[in-house]
Image (spheres, helix red, strand yellow):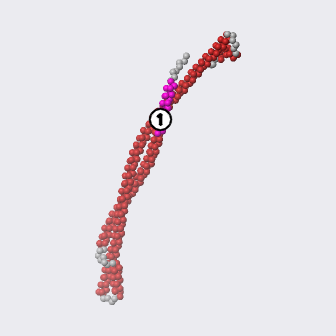
Amino acid sequence: MAETRPLPDLKSLDDEISSLTKERRTIIEELKGMREARRNLLTNLKEIREHLKIQRDMRDAAINNLRQLVEESKSVKAKMQESLQALSSGRREIMASGRARKEETFDNIERAITELEWRLQTERLTREQEKSLLQKIKEMHMKRAEIKQREAALEKLKRITSESTNLSERLKEIEVKIDEEKKKIDSAKEAVSKLIVRRTTQQSELEMLNKTIQEKEEKLNSLQGRLQISLAKRRELLEAKRQEEAKKAKERMNQEINKIKEEIRSRFIEGKKIGFDELKLLLNPEDEIT
């Protein structure tokens, strides 16, 4: 005779299934929240990467601008040095032309030369007078050259002074822009540093969350396996109970049939009248429920 396995109690199985189902539902809800948190972390990390690119691009652009401004500053300073040398040269030219009186203008000298030349051509002059006029005309031509040289030197000095002033103003503008670009670089570097800290923190959180999710998923798989086993045991138990009840019902039915047959047999022995169906039941043992 085959050895029968002891089956667990149905209530214990139902309690176990209920507990496993409840725990499974709890883990599924936890996983749902964790996966949502992971999606948020991944979204945040994507945004951080985008902001990092923006800040690094801004930093690189500011560094490039700073390099250009520094080069321009060097160029302006070199031009200013040249301008200072030109100013010094211009002042020397003015000092060299300083023999001409400031109150004597180019037009006055021109008129004086014209008058002297007119006298030379129209007046009756002695040889000494003519020689004197020629000397004055010569002196006037020299003065005119000095005045022309002085005016040219003054104009040049004015132009150089204006250029020097413009260069000085441009240098100030460049220095202001250099300070602005340095501030942009510092600001971008600080922003990049903070973003990297945020990224590191959130990557660490993501790693921990992934590990927890994996553990929860493994636990869920284990629970589902245990639940399937418990459900299989419950089905087996219910089937066994059904078979047991069917066996008992068959035994009860056979007992009823045997009782009826015994009554029919007693009546037959006593010579009492029995029906055809009763006689058939009495003579046919196969009528028992199989």
The answer to whether residue 289 is visible is: yes
**Relative image position of residue 270 (x, y in whole percent):** 67, 10
Residue 79 vs 39, above or below: the answer is below
- Residue at the spot 32% in from the left edge and 74% down from the top edge: 150
**Measuring 31% from the left and 82% from the top, which residue is drawn there?**
136
197 on left or right of 284: left
Q: Give neighbour class at mark 1: few <14, some 14-19, many 20+ (Cα, 10 Å).
A: few
In the visual, does 3 lie left or right of 62?
right
Instruction: Kindly indicate the quadrant of the structure image that contains residue 113.
Output: bottom left
Image coordinates for residue 44, horizontal then vertical, percent: 44, 45
The percent coordinates of residue 50 (x first, y second) are 45, 48
Q: Residue 260's x, y, as percent?
A: 64, 15
Q: Residue at x 30, y 84 (%)?
A: 132
Q: Quadrant of the C terminus?
A: top right
**Residue 280 vs residue 54: left or right?**
right
Magenta span main SS? helix
Residue occupying image coordinates x 56% and y 24%: 239
Residue 71 visible in the current orientation: no
12 magenta-colored: yes
Residue hosting label 1: 26
**Stretch of the chain drawn in magenta:** 9-33
Which residue type does callout 1 highlight? Thr
Please state if 199 lies on the left or on the right of 233 as rendered.
Answer: left
Q: Relative to the observer, which residue lies in front, 131 or 248?
A: 248
State the residue in front, 134 or 238. 238
Task: Determine the image quadrant of residue 245.
Answer: top right
